[in-house]
Image: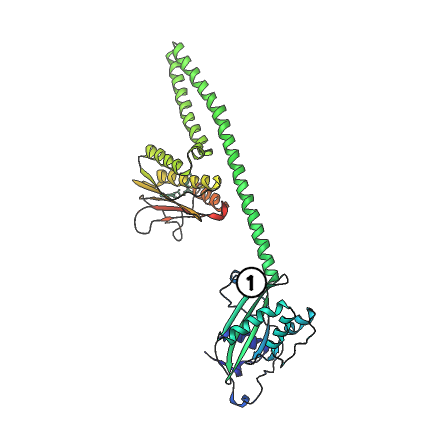
Amino acid sequence: MGLSWDRVRSWREVKSMSWAGRNNAVDFPSHRAGHPVHPVVHPVRAHRRSRIQGDESDELVPQMGAMEATVLILDGEWRIIEGDPDWFDLWARRGYEFELTQGQSFKRYCEWCALWGAPEAVIPLEAMRAIDGGAEHFSRTYKVRQERRKLTVTTFSANGGRFAVFSRLDLTELFKLRRDRLRLEGKLTSALSSLISIRDDERERIARELHDGAAQCLVGIKLGLAHLRLKSGDPEVIATAADVSGMVEQYQADLRILTYMLYPPLLEQLGLRRALQALCATFTARSGIDIRLAAYGTAPHRACVVDAAIYRVVQEALSNVQKHASALRARVRLIERPDSVIVAVVDDGVGLDLSQNEGDAPPLGSGLGIPGMTSRAHELGARVVVHNRAGGRGTIVAASFPRQVW
Ligand SMILES: Nc1ncnc2c1ncn2[C@@H]1O[C@H](COP(=O)(O)OP(=O)(O)OP(=O)(O)O)[C@@H](O)[C@H]1O
Ligand SMILES: [Mg+2]
């Protein structure tokens, strides 16, 4: 769609033409044909949305939408038609003596300044050379004297002539904010990582205490009960001792599971893959479900908190398969890539009961398993999804841990 000059009422609109009407011809009404192309407009600063693409400032585009651009409009001979005061002030502020005025050749001016070693002139000159060489558009983010700027040059034709709009954004503050944000994110990630590792150390300590304290004590109690049964001739005492002994055994088994859940010692001894294999074998033996691990890729070096989190995700997912799925088979897939590690547990069971839910989300319940694995993974910047299999029976739990958390 061509832009109509009748619709262009203000400096703001002239500025926005550089974006909205990129490469479009502007149709001037014929009675203006003899006039110098100099719109009578108010030098209003424009807030407008940038559509700049294709260089390092891309990720700043949303913020740039709210920024002011300073604009300079030139004719086909690079003569200045109109411009924001900033374009003129800048050179004066830098101490260049030559005044920049309307009607003057901006190219000659930049060449002259470049001869005097003005770094500000380099990129505009490059833009003009590119457009003289046939380009219709030029865009570059650059650094000059600690300032970050973006220059965009757009050309358009009107009344048989060519025109160019130079649009300059000052990105210095944005780049500073981005650098600060990245630094803070880095600190946050390492703080979270050490928090998780402190928590894991604490769990390991509690597991050891339980193993060395309560578990040994239970062994003692069992020996005592056995002694009692052996020595006592009273059948009632023998029966009670046998009962209590059974309860102790049950408690020993619970304690073993508790300590194991608190701290999976295999993980450190065997590494993630073999620990997962052992976990699958344990669940198969316990539940009768055919559970197997398939691992792909080569294991890159990463922090053990990530391995522990992956292990926990699989552990909880398999425990859910055992408790809720009525499945015959389950598969654990581990895909290790240089930039991420993905783990998925798929079963062929009854699937999630979504009757109370909107969408394919895990059932809301009082369970801690899925919320626990999700928050643990989130702490490490990972995403967890739990949903029903699309093309068949069963459930999928998948988590993807990105490299930046290692
Ligand atoms: N593999 C699965 N197959 C079928 N339903 C599942 C499966 N995994 C989870 N669910 C459903 O999702 C619910 C929530 O699971 P979650 O692990 O959060 O809690 P829970 O297993 O009930 O309790 P907890 O994990 O605290 O012992 C379960 O109660 C169950 O209804
Ligand atoms: Mg659970």
The residue at which mark 1 appears reads as 63
Q: Dot 1: within a 10 Å radius of its alpha carbon, few (fewer than 14), some, or many (20 or more) residues?
A: few
**Residue 137 in view, yes or no:** yes
On screen, residue 44 versus residue 2, left or right, reads right
Q: Picture coordinates of residue 125 (x, y %)?
A: 57, 72
Q: In the image shown, does 253 or 86 lie closer to the viewer?
A: 86
On screen, residue 41 versus residue 251, left or right, reads right
On screen, residue 250 versus residue 201, left or right, reads left
Relative vertical location of residue 168 with respect to residue 338 in this rendering, above or below: below
SS under mark 1: helix
Rendered image quadrant of residue 48? bottom right
> Which residue: 61% across, 70% down?
121
Q: In the image shown, does 146 or 28 lie closer to the viewer?
A: 146
Q: What residue type is labelled 1?
A: Gln
How many numbered marks appear? 1
**Residue 363 in view, yes or no:** no
Q: Picture coordinates of residue 204 (x, y %)?
A: 50, 32
Q: In which quarter of the image is ligand 1?
A: top left
Disc 1 Cβ-to-ligand 1 distance below 8 Å? no
> Which residue: 53% across, 34% down?
202
